[in-house]
């Protein structure tokens, strides 16, 4: 979990400020004058010094001063903001502006150019970035290479475009940076091998999209001004994503995009992607930190997943504590015997007896269950 951004106001260099600003921040003024300063009223100060004063007061121990200053930062006139951003700001001030104005692309674009911007501020911006702000951050490759944690944060932000996430992984791989994100090695391998997405087996792809979009549009009872299509950056008309069936959305993705969706997506997406014919994608879905016990049980019972997926589930101790997951793995003929055989002693007697007689499990599982029954009988005699 990312820690909240806490501007280090104590690091402000007062000597770099105008005398009037120094006087305010050294608390040489009476309370009413400090409150006026928190509201942005300090005659004679240039925008950069004024914003520095308000930023410092926004972190003051006096709750009245801090509240007033935060309100001032959030509602600064655009001319003051732009005037301040045209000068180099100190790192704590940049952090305060990121906290209060980090949802404004024009502000973020200029903050990213500040020489003093710190890693914590960048991580905060990346954590809360919208699609457009995520794109702004992602284009600053020098900052990303200097602070790889920002790449990780952007990748894990679901609002960041798939294409942007692809570029971030490629940037890391190209520069030999190993990221601490789920399935990074799988995504890196996909890029290194220049894998090509598997062809979809869905018939009549264009017809299917049209029919499904038509059905969903009727079910949603669209408003008169709502449309199932949108125009992309190239001026081409395309079906809006919310009207494209999930399997069709996935079929259009690259391998690295599938890996990201498998890692960060919802349950329905994971349960589709865990059956993907590409082992990197399927393994990413099985390794997702968002995978829950119920999903693991369903996957463990599926005969349409590759051995690697079942191996990942079997090696996850948090899942194999579940009796149902253990039973499903043992009952699944695709589970490697090395893993399923170790779980047999943990089954209830009636399940062991049923598996010993079942024709739906491999012969080696039947034999192992019979041997387990014999050991139980021998132990009682």
Image (cartoon, helix red, strand yellow):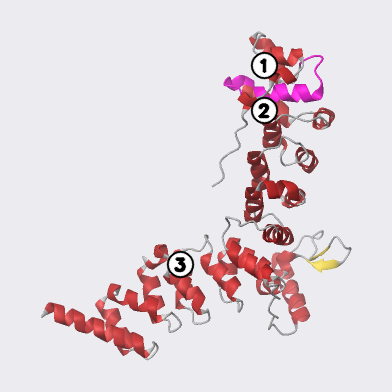
Residue 37, x across and y down, in percent: 71, 17
Quarter of the rendering containing residue 6: top right
Look at discs 1 and 3 and give the one toward the viewer. 1
What's the residue at 65%, 22% (across, down)?
57
Magenta span includes 64: yes
Question: From the viewer's perspective, is 226 left or right of 8?
Answer: right
Residue occupied by mark 3: 294
What's the residue at 84%, 62% (across, down)?
232
Residue occupied by mark 1: 25
Residue 98, x across and y down, in percent: 70, 37
Residue 241, x across and y down, in percent: 73, 65
Q: In the rendered structure, which disc, 1 or 3, sits on the residue that comes first in sequence?
A: 1
Are the two marked residues, 2 and 3, in contact with CB atoms closer than 8 angstroms? no
Question: From the viewer's perspective, is 217 left or right of 152?
Answer: right
Quarter of the rendering containing residue 198: bottom right
Quadrant in which the C terminus is drawn: bottom left
Residue occupied by mark 2: 70
Can you see residue 273? no
Q: In the rendered structure, which disc, 2 or 3, sits on the residue that comes first in sequence?
A: 2
Q: Which mark is residue 185?
A: none
Distance (Cα) linking label 2 and label 1: 16 Å
Residue 354, x across and y down, in percent: 30, 84
Q: Secondary structure at mark 2?
A: helix
Label 2 Cα neighbours within 10 Å, binned few <14 / some 14-19 / many ≥20: many
Distance (Cα) linking label 1 and label 3: 56 Å
């Amino acid at each position: 979990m990312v820690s909240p951004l806490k501007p280090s106001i104590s690091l402000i260099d007062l000597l770099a400020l105008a005398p009037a600003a120094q006087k305010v921040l050294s608390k040489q003024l009476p309370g009413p004058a400090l409150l006026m300063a928190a509201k942005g009223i300090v005659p004679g100060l240039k925008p950069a010094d004024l914003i520095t004063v308000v930023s410092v007061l926004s972190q003051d121990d006096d709750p009245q001063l801090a509240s007033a200053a935060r309100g001032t930062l959030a509602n600064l006139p655009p001319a003051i903001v732009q005037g301040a951003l045209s000068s180099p700001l100190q790192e704590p001030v940049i952090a305060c502006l990121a906290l209060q104005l980090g949802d404004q692309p024009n502000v973020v674009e200029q903050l990213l150019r500040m020489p003093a911007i710190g890693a914590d501020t960048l991580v905060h911006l990346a954590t809360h970035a919208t699609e457009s702000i995520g794109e702004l951050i992602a284009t600053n490759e020098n900052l990303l290479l200097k602070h790889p944690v920002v790449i990780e944060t952007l990748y894990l932000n679901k609002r960041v475009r798939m294409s942007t996430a692809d570029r971030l992984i490629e940037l890391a791989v190209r520069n030999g940076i190993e990221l601490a994100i789920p399935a990074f090695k799988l995504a890196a391998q996909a890029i290194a091998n220049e894998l090509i997405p598997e062809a979809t087996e869905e018939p009549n792809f264009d017809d299917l999209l049209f029919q499904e979009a038509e059905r969903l549009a009727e079910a949603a009872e669209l408003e008169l001004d709502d449309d199932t299509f949108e125009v992309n950056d190239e001026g081409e008309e395309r079906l809006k994503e919310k009207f494209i069936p999930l399997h069709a959305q996935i079929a259009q993705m690259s391998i690295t995009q599938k890996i990201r969706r498998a890692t960060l997506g919802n349950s329905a997406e994971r349960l589709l992607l865990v059956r993907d014919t590409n082992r990197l994608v399927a393994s990413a879905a099985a390794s997702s930190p968002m995978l829950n016990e119920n999903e693991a049980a369903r996957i463990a019972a599926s005969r349409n997943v590759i051995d690697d997926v079942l191996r990942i589930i079997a090696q996850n101790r948090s899942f194999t504590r579940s009796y149902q997951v253990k039973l499903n793995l043992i009952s699944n003929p695709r589970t490697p015997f090395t893993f399923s055989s170790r779980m047999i002693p943990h089954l209830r007697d009636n399940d062991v007896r049923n598996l010993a007689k079942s024709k739906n499990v491999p012969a080696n599982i039947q034999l192992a269950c019979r041997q387990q029954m014999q050991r139980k009988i021998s132990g009682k005699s």
